[in-house]
Amino acid sequence: MPTVAREVMETSFLSLSPQATIAEAGEVFRRAADTAGRTVFGLMVIDEAGKPVGMLSMYDIFLLIRPKHIHIWGEMEDLDVAGIIDRACAKAKQVRVSDVMTTDLITISPETHLLHVIDIMIKRHVRRLPVIEDGRVVGLVYMSRVFRRLLERLA
């Protein structure tokens, strides 16, 4: 029997509103990690109609916090890096999720074969894929879940 996304997807997951602030998103990331018992690297962004509109990942937040001109700092020893990150975090708290989320969603269906899932993850450098059915998110396939399924077959 072929292994498809439906067999490895997680159907219980927390999501964000595009109108949420990054401070609110941080709370949801912490709650998701507590619920899952592991670090959660990204969350779905779903509008009020239940439609997927984006994904917010740790990487998106890193890009928001990282100073734009960090590459020219070089050997600047007198730089107050702690102050810079504190100010960046304070400023980021009020930014809306919709302003920094990834909107170019790569999605799969519940019947997408695991080999195709692996191919997408490798080629597109993604760790999670939303599973869409009838325009709604019905689950998420995480790289770790796919890997565990492969390990079962390797045993």
Image: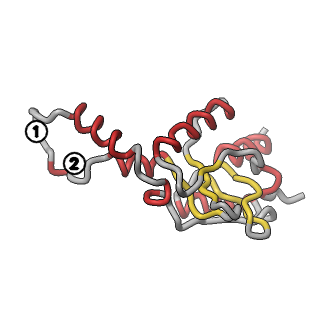
Q: Is residue 41 left or right of residue 138?
A: left
Helix, strand, or loop for circle 1? loop
> Which quadrant of the structure image shows residue 48?
bottom right
Residue 99 pos. (x, y %): 44, 59
- For the N terminus, give its image quadrant: bottom right
The furthest residue to the bottom: 134
Q: Nearer the viewer, residue 91 or 152?
A: 91
The residue carrying pointer 2 sits among few (fewer than 14), some (14 to 19) or many (20 or more) residues within 10 Å by Cα, namely few
Residue 151 pos. (x, y %): 73, 41
Residue found 57% across the figure and 35% down from its top: 39
Residue found 53% across the figure and 56% down from its top: 19
Residue found 77% across the figure and 63% down from its top: 113
**Mark drawn on residue 70:** 2
Check the image and report above or below for 35 versus 62: above
- For the C terminus, give its image quadrant: top right
The residue carrying pointer 1 sits among few (fewer than 14), some (14 to 19) or many (20 or more) residues within 10 Å by Cα, namely few
Q: Nearer the viewer, residue 17 or 72?
A: 17
Question: Which numbered disc flags the more N-terminal residue, 2 or 1?
Answer: 2
> Which quadrant of the structure image shows residue 55?
bottom right
Q: Are marks 2 and 1 in contact (CB under 8 Å)?
A: no
Residue 94 pos. (x, y %): 41, 47
Helix, strand, or loop for circle 2? helix
**Mark drawn on residue 76:** 1
Check the image and report above or below for 74 versus 119: above
